[in-house]
Image (cartoon, coloured by chain):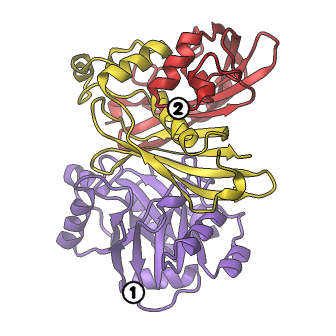
Amino acid sequence: MSLTFDDVDFGAELPPIAPDVTLANVRRFTTASGMTFARFHDHEQARKEGLPGAIVPGIMSQGILVALIHRWAPGAVVRKIDTIFRAPILVDSHPVARGVVTDKNDETRTLEIDLTIQNEAKETRVVGTATVELP
Amino acid sequence: MILDLHNHSIKSDDGRAKVENYCQWIKKRELGLDGFVLTEHRQFDAESDYRKLEDEYGILILKASEVETDYGHVLVFGVNDDLRAAYDFTRIDLPLELVIRETERCGGVAVPCHPGRPRVGMCAHFEAKGPVEGVRVIETLNGGSRGEEDAAALALAEARGYRGIGGSDAHIVSQIARCVTRFPNEIRDGDGLVAALRAGDFEALSWK
Amino acid sequence: MEIDVEALKRDWTGFTFDTAEFEALTADLVGFATACGETAKRYTDPSDPDFQAVPNYPSRYVGRRVLPDNFPRLGGGYGFDAGKCVTPIAPIRAGDKITARSQIHDVYTKTGRSGTMLFIVHRMEFSNQRGEPVSVVDWRMVQQDRGAQ
C-alpha cells in the first residue's frame, strides 16, 4: 500500500539508499542519457582533466534522489526537484542518499523534502530539495 | 544561550530553506537551540519581518549578512542603514580591511567565516598576502567544513588570539544546528548579539 | 578579469537562442531510470500502462548550442554543471517528440571553493508534439575565472 500524505509527519526520514555508482552502472547511465564526456566513464581520462577519477554525472545524482523518493513513496508525484552539485561524487565510491521531510502543506497536500548525497567521509556532495505530492 | 550564527534561507541564491521550517525543525527535533541568525549571501534582507515567527515558536531570529572579500567570506552582524551605505554588499571583491573598519565604525562586528576553506577562507589569503588588522573573532566551527578546514581555523585562532564562533552554514532546513555558539547571558536582539560578540565571552560548539 | 554582470544580463537574458528536437526513446527512458535505481514500474517497465520518463529526465537534453553565439567564455570553455532545477509539468511518454527552447534566464557572480565564478542560469522549456508544455529545466552553469585563482 503506497504511502499517503496523511501517513507522513514533519521530520519523517526517508530510508537511505546506497546507490550503484560503479563504473559499469554509470556507463549504463551515460549510454542512456547520451553523455559521452570521458570524465564520466573513464578514470584515466578524468585524471587527465585534473579530476581524481571518473565522476558521477550531476543529473544521475539527481535521478538517484528521485529514485530515493519513489522507493519511499511509490505513489509520489515530484512537482519540483532542485539540486546543487557542490562537489563531485566519484565513480566506484560508496555514497549514501538521504531525505527528510521539512515542510508539510495541508492545502496543496505537498511535502518538501531535504535531499543529500554524502560520500564516505560524510561530506555532502549533492544537496537539494524536492516538492512532492502524495495521494 | 545557544545560537546558530550562520544560516541561509531562500533569500540566498543557493539557499533552499524557509524560515518557518527552520523553526519547526528546531522544535520537532528538540534541538536545544535558542535562536539562529540568517546571514544571506551578498545582501541584507531588510524587508522580512520574523517577529511573528519568534513569538509563535519562542525562538530568537536575527538577520545579518555574508559578504565576499579579497580575504574570503565574512559574516557581518549588526547591519544598519549606515553600514549598508558604507560598502556595496553585492560586490565579490570587497577589501577585508574596509569591511572590518567600516563595520566597526557603524557599530557592527565583522567575523571572517570558514577561514580554513580554500579560496573563500582567510587562512589561505593570510599565507599569501599577510594578516589584516582588526580581526577579533572568526568562525572556528562551520557546519559545511570538509577535512581539516575547521582544524586550520582553530589553529589560526590560537596563533593570533582570535575568539571563535560556531555556525552551521545551513542552506537546507535539516542542516541547522550542526555548529552553534554558546553565550553565558541572554541575548534578545541584534544589538545584544553585537555586544556579546564584542565582549568575547562565548564558545563555539560542534553538534555534528 | 572584470565581469560586467549587468551588461551580460542586459545583452543576453530573456530571448530564445536555440531550439532543438528530441525523441523520447523507450530504451533510453528505461536505461536512465534503472541506472538511477528507480524501482517504480511506471518508469522501468514499458508494459506498464502509465510508463513514462522519470521526472528529471529532460535534464539530460542539451540543445544544439549550450550558450548563445558570441556569449563570453570566461576561462575558455562552457564551464561546469553546478546544479539543476526541474519542474515537471506533464509526463513524457515513450515516442514523444520533444521540442526544447533555450534562453539565458539569469547571470550572477560569486566566490567559492573554486574561486571567482560566473553563474549562468540556462533555462530550457520543453513541449511535446501536441505543443503541450511538459517540463522546465533551469541549469546553473558555472564558468571560472582561472586567471584570478
Q: Residue at x 19, y 66 (%)?
A: B155
Question: Label for residue B167?
Answer: none
Classify residue B75 by image quadrant. bottom left
> In the image, C59: left or right of C103?
left
Which is more toward the observer, C41 or B204?
C41
- Which chain wears red? C
Q: Label 2 to label 1, Cα distance in Å? A: 56 Å
Which color was chain A given? Answer: yellow
Provide the chain ID for the residue under circle 1. B
Residue lying farthest to the front in this orientation: A1
> To which residue does mark 1 refer?
B199
User: Could you tell me if residue C75 is visible in this image?
Assistant: yes
Query: Where is residue C93 shown, x and y percent of the image?
Result: 69, 17
Which is more toward the observer, A63 or C107?
A63
User: Could you tell me if residue B106 is visible in this image?
Assistant: no
Which color was chain B given? Answer: purple
Q: Is residue C59 above or below residue A89?
A: above
> To which residue does mark 2 refer?
C39
Task: Give amino acid for label 2.
Answer: Thr
Quadrant placement of the C terminus of chain B: bottom left
Query: Where is residue B156 shown, x and y percent of the image?
Result: 22, 65
Provide the chain ID for the residue under circle 2. C
Task: Give amino acid for label 1.
Answer: Ala
Q: Is residue A59 above or below residue A33?
A: below
